Each structure stands twice: as structure tokens, then as C-alpha cells.
Image (cartoon, rainbow, N blue to C red):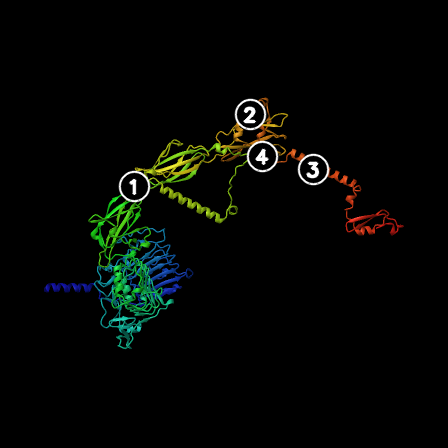
Amino acid sequence: MLSSHMLLGASLMLLALHFPSAELKPEHECTSIDIRNECNQMHLLDNCTVVTGYVMITLIASEQHCNFSEYTFPLLTEITEFMIFTEVRGLTHITKMFPALTVIRGRRLFLNYALGVTNMYDLEELAFPQLVAIQRGQVYIGNSPKLCNIDQVNWDLLTLSSGENHVTMVSKSCSTPMCSGCSSSHCWSNVYCQRSLNDNVGNSSIKIENCHEDCLGGCKQVMSAANCTACRGLSDAGVCVKSCPKDKYIMEHFQRCYTRDECVTKHGYVISGSQCVAFCPSGYRTDNQSECVLCGPEEACISFCTPEYPGNTFHIYNLADAEKLRGCQIYNGSLVITIRNKVNETELYQSFTAIREVRGHVKVYRSSQLRSLNFLRNLERVHGDPPENRHYSFILYDNKQLAELWKPARKLELMEGGMFMHRNNKLCNRRMREFQSVVTHDKALDSLQTNDQEVQCSPLKMQLFVQKRTHRTAKLSWLKSQTSQRLELIHRPLPPGQWYHEESELEAPICTRINWKRRLLFPDDLVDNGTHYLFQLEDLQPDTRYACLLRTFGDELAQEARSDLIYFQTELDIPKPPLLELVKKTDSSLTVRMASHDHDSFLLTVFKLEDDQKYIEQRNYCHQLSFVWRDMDGPNWTGFEDYEDCCAHKAEQLDDSRFIANMREQYRCTLDDRQQCRRISLAEATLPQLRLPRNTTQYEINSLPRYRLYELQLQACNSLGCSSHTTLYGRTNYTLGANLLTQLHACHIRETDKYVLRFEEPANPNGLVTNYVIHYRNKFNQTHVGCVTRKDHQKAGYVYVKRLNITYTECAVRVHSLAGDEMTPYMSIIQCSEDDQRQFAHSREAKELAPEHSELPVTASHARGISIFLICFLLGCSASLVWVLYKRRCWKRIPGLRRYVPVREQWLLDRQQTEDREILVDGFETVRFQNNNDSQADDYPM
């Protein structure tokens, strides 16, 4: 024993000789540092070892021309709250700026984050070589387009509290670091490895392998708490301790031990027991010694908070918002909690632990990450002034993960209004009713989730079996002993290979299960075979994979059970009619696209539909010209058909397409109705029936005549048969020049007005030929146009004769077919030879059909028309001249006409001639007198 004590003493002496005595690490505390607009404020961080607050470096523009490489802070090891970088131009590397930063405690957060880097447009490298822990809060990195390597950092290893890190890597030009020499595959860069919370190795240069258990991130002396890089817990003047000495007080927010003077004078806090706090807890007040003492019976020691927000409503979106309620007992307003990121709910309780009353209403709304409301367990009274929607003072709505309310620590009372609980997918009805029963309020005002939205509380396992499957049905069975008062069966089709997790939309309200079908069942409606209930699912789709789930509910005493999600696939049916579409066509081919999903092959049948020549030739295309529809631009189209007519036409087309789809579905070939399966008659098929492989998506039909109409019928086939056919009509394109005449002979019979044209039909025209239009012209720009139908031209032996009283020297023929018209080049008209005249004399055209030829209107002036016009004009002038001469000669011989000619009275008075006078009587009748000055008045009896 003595020798062992001597050996231990010698070891301690050697250790003391090898290592100097522990010296306290000098600490220089800095309060929160906000650096913005000017980079020379970066010197505020000089000599800081600990920032008891936050560090924000923001809004430094490029015009500052900052040289950030000059700024480095090797003494800073700890930040008690958060660190934010945003809108700092010119900063490319953060590595050398904070080479010794070891821990960010996150005692107060910015939103939910303790480290935030955003809108850093020039930042290329983000590295904290000594950072081992972010004790509270998460990491946000976004909108930094040049930032690289952040995907190699294990951010979940840094953030010790549960939550959700938001890290977005934008740059695509980054090379992945190799992390060579690192103990793990995580690193900041090729130079710096990522450290973890367990990396507690000291200075390797002096062979120190382990540090004190209270050290964090390393140390400078073995097994000493005095020279730790940072402390895991409390720090007392640079020494890591588990608890503060008796003469000092714990400031939990800064994780420090302070004297009374430091707590009260330096930080402005108060003493509460062994703690240095910002305010006294509930039921205590501050005395003149800055200590918290118990309130007397007559004292109102209540922390009363009034919101500084419009509408007296405080919205809580994150832990930082919740921190603002710490210490508040009565909140004079309404609380709306909407937390959509994963947070530590224990920390929420620390913020809400003092809350006793809310004067307004409490609303937990779309908090998708909250699982429990236990942080509200100290709440005692909700006044509901004003109530939500004039009826409710406690509202739970659309909280996807909320599965637990809380058991009130004291009596909970809703002074005005009731409860509103809806669309909380995992909040089971039993717990909801239990909470409703323990809260004092007017239950008549409550609105709770209905039976259609029931969620089960810890249900028993239910066995669901698939007994039989067909192409349309599936028979299900389960034990009678596991069945309660009602059942809910939900199912939906699934793509191949897709699986559903238990935490999915299965527990969502029925109105939100868009793709799920629901059936509510009762035991009296089910088939009973003694031990099992049977139910047959109908109206399923053939060859389709389904997911199915069965749940059973009862009253509060009955058991609840739920099956696992089972999967089954229906049997095959005859395929549906395939899709068929014309995608390309030429003058000799048609290309179609096809698709189906439940087939083994395609069957394609082609029919050539001949144009009805007899029906087409009932019309005389020389007298009834064909109407050509021309493309029109926007304004012309608008004038042709207005907007309402266009919309009505499209609506009619949509109705037609729906009707056709319904008819195809109703009368398609299936195993349920074999009578609809009809064989295609191959007697009129143009081509042999084509069997195409299953993977065919496009097929080209070649060697087709030009401008011919075809009917394409496509069927999808499998082992059970072929589907009803899908029909597509398509016409091949026309070919330019196909309508041109290969031989044209034109001549003029001497000393006559007869012109003879001889031409055969085109060998392979663009569809049926309807008529021919013959054009004549001469060097005087005189023209004539004639027309003959194809039928008449064939009857005439392909000879066309026309009498023309003007000499023409050239002619051409325009051939009209169903595809349009084409005109041959003009050719010279020659004198007919004796053989031509002989052939013409024996032709049927010369004997019978000459008077029947039709003419089109002449396009130029005709000599005969001019002569007729001149003759008529001269005859009219001659007749007018004869009439005038005749009237002048016979004027005086017609006194009856002359007496009605009006004479001006003034002119009769002024006229003093020797001839007879005429006097106007009664305004229109004239009396003639002889002009005799010697006559007396009595000589003319009246």
C-alpha cells in the first residue's frame, strides 16, 4: 500500500514538472454586435472571446470597397444567441474571419435559426474549422449563387436540437471536396474537416489526448476545466463548472455565473434564488434590493402583457416569436400559433410556461409540424374577447401532425364561446372528446370533427383478406370478432410499383382524399359466413393495382381496429379501344400514332374508300362552279363569324366528343358484354391486315395512290381477344403536276370558224377529274374561255370543237379535279391537216355535241359586241333627228297643240308689231286679234 502511494505521488510530481500550473483563460465579453452599412464597424469584434448576444453582419454594399481579408477574430469562440450574414457584397470567404468559433448556443433565435446565410452573392466558401455544435436552433443557407461545398457538411450533426435545417445549394460549377485525411466523409473544404460534439481532443502538439468532461471543442491542458476552448454548460470566469459557486448566480440565458453586482448593475437583471433573471416569476415581485420576493396576499403580482400589433393579435411563427411571451402571465389579446417548421416543443413550453390567461381567443392554425399542445398546459382561462367568427374562443384547424392536446394542470375555462376542431388529421375523436369534457365552457357552441373525419386512437390490428378477384370485382373478408358498429372501407387505384406510407393522406378528412373512394358499411348489410364478414368491391378497373384499407369504429366503449394497407390487382379484360391519331401524310403514305396500355399487340386494317363518281358527275361543274374555301386572317375571320358563334361551335364540338366517348365506352367490347365484340369484314380491305407489336407507337402505311380517301381501323388485342376498333379517316396528299395533260393537239380548220382540240384524260390525276376549262388567246390580247365536263368530253371521243369568229393563235387547258386545278402551258394552234379534218368529220363531237358546249364569260372586248353597240347607237341618233325635224315642220299646222303653249303676259304688252296679237285669257287660253289701229271697240262684239 505504501509503495502504491509513493508511485502515485511520483507520478503527480512528474506531471507537475511537465506541465505548468493552470492559468485562467482571459475572457472578454461583448454584448450583441450589429455591423451594417460600413465595414469599419467590423473592429467591434476585436478582442471579443464571447459575444453574450448575437452577431449580425448585414447590408454592406460593394461601394464600400471593403477588404474583408484584413478582418480576422481568432479570439472569438462562443456566441450565446445567433449569427446572421446577409447582403454583404465583396465577402468571398468566411473561413479566416472566425477560425476559432466553437459553439453557437442559440439561447435566442432569429426566427427558428441560430445560423443564417442568405443573399450573399459573392460568397464562395463558408467554413468554421472549429465549430462543433449549434446547441439550439437550426441553420438557414439560401440564395448564395457562388457558394460551394455546403452539401458535404453534416448540418444535422451540428444542430443538436430537433428541427429542420434549410440548406439550398444553387451553384452548379462546384467541385466536390474529397475530405481527404478526415475521420468522416464530412468536411468544410479540402483543407478543413468537420468536427463533431465528441471531438474533445486538446493540443496535439503537446500530446494531450483528452480534455476535461466539461470542455467543449478542445482544451490546452489535460483534465483541467480552466483552459477549455468553450464550456459545455456553465462558465465561471473562464472555468467550466457544473454549478455556480454560492456567492454567484446563474444567468441561464448566457450560461454564465455572475456576482450580484455583475447581475444587477452590469446586466440590469434581478436575483431570484440562485438565478440571475430578467424578471421575477409568477407570484413574486422585485424589492429595493433587486431581489424577487413572494407577493403578499393583497398584492397583485401579475405580469400583464399588451400586444403592440394591430387587432390585438400576436402571431407566433417560430421559437423567436414565442420567446417574446416568456414571463407573461396574462396576455391582453389573442394568440394565433402557426408553426410550420419542426421545432423543439420543450422550448415552446419554456416560453409559454408562465401564461395563465388570454383575454382574446387562442387559435392553432395550420401548424404542420406540431405534434402536441402540452406547452399550453398551464393555461387556465381564455376569455374569448373577441371570439373567432363570433362563436369560438379555442380553435384547432388543419394541423396535419397534431395528435395530442394536453391535460390542464389546473381547471381550464372558456369564458365566452366554444371550441372549433376540424381537419386535424391525427387528432383522434376520443381524446378530443375527453378534452372537451374537462374544459368548462358552453358545449352547445362547439363544432367538432364529424364521423366522416374520425381518427382512431391506438386502434387494434385488423386482418383483411382478398378472397377472389375478377376484372371488375374483388371480394374482401375479415373476422366478425374484430368488427364494431360501423366500418369504413377506402380504396384507390395506384400506378405499378407505388406504395403508401402509414403517415399519408389516409388519415386526412374524406373531403381531402381526392383520389380515394370511401364506403361506409354496417354489419347488418354484410354477408356473414359464420366467422367472417364478406364484402365485394365492384366497378373496379381491369388490370389495375389497388390499395385498400378497412377501419372499424364504435362508441366510447367499443373497440377500434384498423387493417394494414393491402394491395391487390384486378384481372385482365379485353382491351379498351386504342388511341389513334394521324400525324403525317404525303401523296403516297399515311403515318399514324397509336397508344394503349393493356394490350399485347395491335391489329390494323386499311380500307380504300372510292369517290362516288356517279354522284359527283350529276353536277355540271361548268355551270355550277366548285366553291373553294380560302384561309382568312384574323379581321376577316372575325367579320365572317363572331366570337359568340365561335364559342357556341366549340361547345357543340365538345358535346359531340363527350357523346362519342360515352357511346364508345357503352358499346365497347368487354368480357361483360361479348355481343359488342364484332369481327371486321376483310373482304373490302385494301391491304392485308397488319399485326403490329405491343411497343409500336407510330406506323407508316406506304404505296398508296395520291389523293385517295382511306378508312383506318385499329384494334388492341391481348390473350382474351381484340377490342372494339378505333376508326380514323385520312386522305393522301395531292401531287403537283399530276393533273397536267401529257398530250394536247389544237388546230384551226381553214376558211371556217372551227377550232379543234384533242386531249386524253390525265393518266393518274389527283382524284376524280370534274371538268376542263379551255383558254384561247391571240397577239391582240383577245381571249376566249370555254368549258366542258369530263363526262361530255369522254362521250365526244376526247375531241373538243368550238366555233369562234376571231382568229386565235394559242390555247391551254385547265384541268379541274377534286384536289383543285392545274393549267397546262399555252401551245400554238396550227392549221388542221386533212387527216385532222377527216377525223373531226367522223367524230361524235361534230355530229351531235357541238351545239351543247358551254361558254364561260369573255374576259376581253369582242368585235361582234362592239359592232352591235355602234349600230344601235346610230339607229337611235337617226330616229331622234327625224322626230325633231318632223315636229318643227308641223308646228304651225297643229293649232290645238300651239294654244296650250304658255305665253308670257309682259312679252305680249311690249310687242308692237303689225301682225296679229294673242292675249292670255284665264291664265292659259289665248285669243287672237288683228292689229288695226283704226278699228273701234264696237267693231268686235264680245
Query: Around disc 3, counting alpha carbons within 10 Å, would you say few (fewer than 14), some (14 to 19), or many (20 or more)?
Result: few
Where residue 907 appears, as percent x and y from the top left, is: 81, 50
- Disc 3 is placed on an element classified as helix
Where residue 203 appears, as percent x and y from the top left, is: 24, 60
Q: Earlier in the sequence, mark 4 or mark 2?
A: 2
Q: Report, in whole angstroms, how far the alpha carbon at label 4 lies from the one at label 2.
A: 23 Å
Q: From this viewpoint, which residue is outermost toward the front? A: 941
Q: Earlier in the sequence, mark 3 or mark 2?
A: 2
Q: From this viewpoint, which residue is outermost toward the left? A: 1
Q: Earlier in the sequence, mark 2 or mark 1?
A: 1
- Residue designated by label 3: 873
Choose mark 2 or mark 1, whichever is in front: 2
- Disc 1 is placed on an element classified as loop
Could one spot residue 126 in this view of the protein? yes
Task: Reply above or below: 275 against 178.
Answer: below
Quarter of the image for the N terminus: give it.
Answer: bottom left
Numbered label attached to residue 856:
4
Q: Which residue is pictured at 36% across the width and 53% down the height? A: 170
Observer-nearest residue: 217 or 169? 169
Residue 803, located in which quarter of the rendered image? Answer: top right
Q: Are marks 2 and 1 in contact (CB under 8 Å)?
A: no
Three-letter amino acid code of the residue under disc 1: Leu
Observer-nearest residue: 340 or 512? 512
Q: Are marks 3 and 1 in contact (CB under 8 Å)?
A: no
Task: Reply above or below: 193 against 844.
Answer: below
- Residue designated by label 2: 844
Q: Report, in whole angstroms, how far the alpha carbon at label 3 lies from the one at label 4.
A: 27 Å
Q: Earlier in the sequence, mark 3 or mark 1?
A: 1
Relative to 862, is 936 on the left or the right? right
Query: Around disc 1, counting alpha carbons within 10 Å, would you say few (fewer than 14), some (14 to 19), or many (20 or more)?
Result: some
